[in-house]
Image: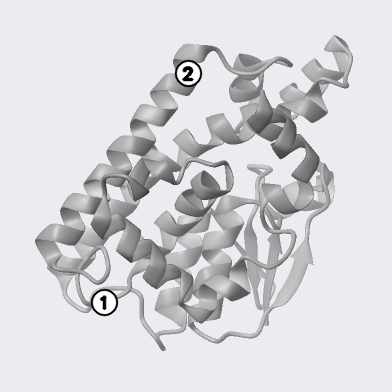
Amino acid sequence: MLELYNFPMSTCSQKVRIVLAEKGLEWKDHRIASGDHLKPDYLELNPNGVVPTLVHDGVPIIDSSVICEYLDEVFPQNSTTPPDAIGRAAMRAWLRYIEEVPTPAIRYPSFNRVLVRNLQKMSKEEFDRAADKRPLRKHFYHRMGQTGFPKEDIDAAFEDLRNACGRMEKALGETGGPWIMGGQFTLVDVCLVPTIDRMEDLGHADMWHRSLPLVTEWWSRIKARPSYKTTFYKGARFSDAYAEVMKETAAA
């Protein structure tokens, strides 16, 4: 039995949902409510206090990239991993880059645009307690504070995101596509999708639409895949859940 503890708008949850959909697997959807990922029963499953967590026949698997590789290993149908060792090494190098650069970078505009609004309603003491409870994100929350990240942090995040899009464009040109590593749709594509979707949702699609034609074409192909439509259901985007906030911040 497969169970996924996840949050609809979590980019890390989304990439695991893509793999589950690509493989046509049945799974139990445990949608985590706000704050539940910090409760003792969830921390027993995942001591990092983040989503997602996969539970397979009672055994928890944590870290979204690890979960994706685990699913591809245990359920080899519709494989998203290259069949040769060199291809797998190249894929894993991409995955490490994605984890170190675009994945953390997208958190900055995401929190600044939407999620910091919830923190502004807290007292300073309430905010400090909420930040200190987070096993992995304590310093991230304190850096952000209740007013958002400093401009230099946001600028650096957008630089990282632009560089990631540029690296995608270069790879698509070198491999000939249609996917990042060439003819096979791999976990590299999977792990990039939630970041690109979030950028588009935040209104930053011009980062590739204006000057990166190969990324633009890749994105159109991604959107045509059934797994994309299954993963990004109504409520899986900021613009679904925070429509008014998105309009206010866009106007500002």
Q: Amino acid at mark 2?
A: Asp
- Dot 2: within a 10 Å radius of its alpha carbon, few (fewer than 14), some, or many (20 or more) residues? some
In the figure, residue 62 lies in which quadrant? bottom right
Between residue 135 and residue 11, name the one nearer to us.
Answer: 11
Residue located 27% across and 68% down the image: 179
Inspect this view and state whether residue 125 appears: yes
Up-down: is 21 above or below 143? below
Q: Is residue 81 left or right of residue 134?
A: left
Badge 1 vs badge 2, beta-carbon distance below 8 Å: no
Q: Where is mark 1, residue-wise?
A: 184
Q: Amino acid at mark 1?
A: Gln
Q: Residue 98: x, y in percent?
A: 36, 47
Q: Where is mark 2, residue-wise?
A: 153
Q: Residue 148: x, y in percent?
A: 65, 18
Inspect this view and state whether residue 135 appears: no
Label 2, secondary structure: give it: helix
Label 1, secondary structure: give it: loop
Residue located 30% across and 56% down the image: 215
Up-down: is 233 above or below 150? below
- Dot 1: within a 10 Å radius of its alpha carbon, few (fewer than 14), some, or many (20 or more) residues? some
Residue located 43% across and 28% down the image: 157
Q: Residue 188: x, y in percent?
A: 34, 61
In the figure, residue 247 lies in which quadrant? top right
